[in-house]
Image (cartoon, grey):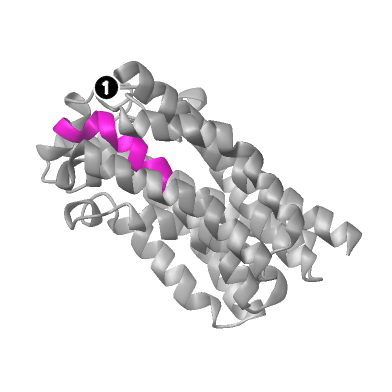
Amino acid sequence: MNLKLWFLETRPAFLLLSVVLAFLGTCIAWYDGAFHLGHAILAFIGLLLCHVSVNVLNDYYDFKSGIDLKTKRTPFSGGSGFLPATALKPRQVFWFGMICFFLAVPIGIYFVLVKGWMLLPLLAVGAICILLYTPLITKWGWPEWSPGIGLGTLPVLGAYFVQTGTYTLPAVIASIPSGFLVHNLLLLNEFPDAEADKTANRKTLPITMGPTGAGIVYTALTIGVYVWTIGAVIAGLMPPFTLIALLTLPFSVKGIQGALNSQNIGKLQAGMANNVLTVLLAQLLLGIGYLLAGFFQ
């Protein structure tokens, strides 16, 4: 077995998202006076397994639908490329994704038992987003909400809950920018795949709204990240130190330029690269903002 090949199949560069999500949720909990290192690590492992699962299953379904044979791969879209190259077998990839999902289940059960049943709805919605995203949700119209919620807002809230055993309004407010960011991470990466996605009856925003409409949605939500954060700070629901996330604005502007000029592949790919930086750095800086606020409160 080529372990390096299987490792690359997980698309490890994208897994950095799980790191910053777990970090942010844990930092918010620490700011609120709750921290358990073992639970933080275990929650991160569970989130990482779920993220690997959705990446791998997406690769499998894209290959089975024929999309992977029609897309032009970029560093940010088009799948791993291993199935079209016959480096891995579809059945193996499918079960790899499912095994990662099933390995995460006992972790979720453990936290429900020790922290409370209120975690269960969050886990159920997350499971739906993992298992149904590619085969079903992408065909329903505006599917980007699924990763936005399932791999954005909910992981932050989940990391918070396993520390505190509860949800609070400030924690919910703080998790919303992650939903916007991850929604847009998927959205911009869908632009190069629009023509191929049409052949599998997918209804992503670049297809249903066209590149111009999808670019406007991307722009609005990107601006929304900063407006939401500033508004929450003014309302006293997020600490002022979280405003350091505004340092990512130069990257966001380039992401917006890529989304609004998607016909220019050079600008689009530059936008996609800066979009990734925005998603990762904004959440990292938000977490650091909570740490700083905790130190100086």
Q: Position of residue 239 (x, y in %)?
A: 74, 62
Q: Position of residue 241 (x, y in %)?
A: 76, 54
State the residue position of label 1. 86
Q: Residue at x 30, y 40 (%)?
A: 215
Side of 22 relative to 191 (left or right) = right
Question: Which amino acid does the dot numbered 1 rest on?
Answer: Thr
Q: Is residue 289 above or below residue 266?
A: below
How packed mark 1 is, by other alpha carbons closer than 10 Å (few <14, some 14-19, many 20 or more), is few
Q: Residue at x 23, y 32 (%)?
A: 193
**Chief SS of the magenta region:** helix
Find the residue positioned furthest to the top: 266
Give the image quarter of residue 233: bottom right
- Please tell me which residue lies in front, 48 or 245: 245
Side of 271 relative to 45 (left or right) = left
Asked which secondary structure carries label 1, the reply is loop
Q: Position of residue 228 (x, y in %)?
A: 54, 59
Magenta residues, start to end: 183-195
- Please tell me which residue lies in front, 31 or 21: 31
- Mark yes or no: residue 96 visible: no
Give the image quarter of residue 155: bottom right
